Image (cartoon, rainbow, N blue to C red):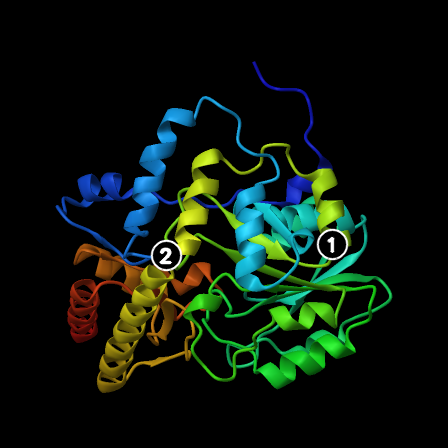
Amino acid sequence: MAVKVESRKILQNIAAYPLGKSIHDIQLELGIPLIRNMSEIENVFGCSPLVKEQIKENLERIYTYPDGSASLLTKNLAEYLQVKQEQVFIGNGSDEIIRLLLRAFINPGEEAIMAEITFPRYKTNVSIEGGIPVLIPLENGVHNLSAMSAAITSNTKMVFICNPNNPTGTIVGKEELIAFIERVPENVLVILDEAYYEYATSNEYLSSVPFLNKFANLVILRTFSKIYGLAGLRVGYGIMDSFIVHELTKVKEVFNVNQLGQSAAVMALEDQGFRLDCLKRNEEGKAFIEFELDRLGYTYFPTQANFIMIHVRKDGKKIADQLLELGVMVKPGTALGYPESIRVTISSMDDNRYFIEALKKVGERG
């Protein structure tokens, strides 16, 4: 029997997020005993041992509802960031906060400006809420802030800047970014998505939190999914004016962040030694991969994240398929706006070396 109830008309032009096959299914399909997954942007070094112990301790309490206000995590983050508690909002991943910002602030027909090639959930969620995504092409893989500024009209409600950008890993220079925020009208939200900020080591990367006191329309999004290794628990946070936090509280689910996620994030924040070790290992892996890519004659975007977008000068999907046959899974650029590229996650040195050797073999095939 067919369903005769129509869904919202706006959904007719929105595709579901394409979820790939599981590693297990691919191994069975290709007959490969081991696949090194370097396609997802995860922290391959896992999470802090202290987090694992904390989760074990909290298993006895999972029959209770979580703290709907995530009060301990909020308090600890505020202290760590040196902001007020009322400026911190905890979400079920930063994805949820993006969705809630749109639910709370954009009206049907209003515009949200973003890069043409960036985190795709901005565009999807703007469309779901009836907003109009305004897409600005990147310039050499970097946000074109001049063009984004020129695109602002009286109908603009918010601007998204992913910094470092996914999928290119590039950053916007700090002076240019400050000048951009200063140009944005006060009634337009500037949303800095800093999911990978812990990986950014460049002196040109803006330390954005101090600017919250100067710009009431500034929203900073961060996550525990990346360097802290908690992607499976879905914990993100936003730092913003207390008024914006108050409005988000109106539209969030009551118990939006699970109990294990909250306690794990508290402990992850406490173990900064683990974070610094992950950063060190990422820098070593990045240096190795970039050195080998230079030696092999490949070009790539200068990354400030834990992944590298590599220009392979051929169909990225074909290269990714050939690498998969050799036991390495990467993200084809065809799905990311760069059809002749692949994106690879910086991983353990063993996996990094294996990837380079596999790339050599693929390159030799011509």
Query: What is the spatial separation of the Cα atoms under label 1 and label 2, in whole angstroms?
Result: 28 Å
Q: Residue 124, position in %: x, y? A: 62, 50
Q: Residues within 10 Å of mark 1 (few under 14, many from 20)?
A: some
Residue under numbered circle 1: 242
Residue under numbered circle 2: 271
Q: Secondary structure at mark 1?
A: helix
Which residue is at 45% across, 21% downward?
63
Q: Residue 43, position in %: x, y? A: 34, 57
Residue 328, placed above or below residue 250: below
Q: Residue 257, position in %: x, y? A: 53, 38
Could you say which quadrant of the image residue 78 lies in? bottom right
Determine if residue 119 is in view.
no
- Identity, as a three-letter code, of the amino acid under mark 2: Asp
Q: Secondary structure at mark 2?
A: loop
Q: In the rendered image, which quarter contains the C terminus?
A: bottom left
62 left or right of 254 in image:
left
Q: Nearer the viewer, residue 170 or 175?
A: 175
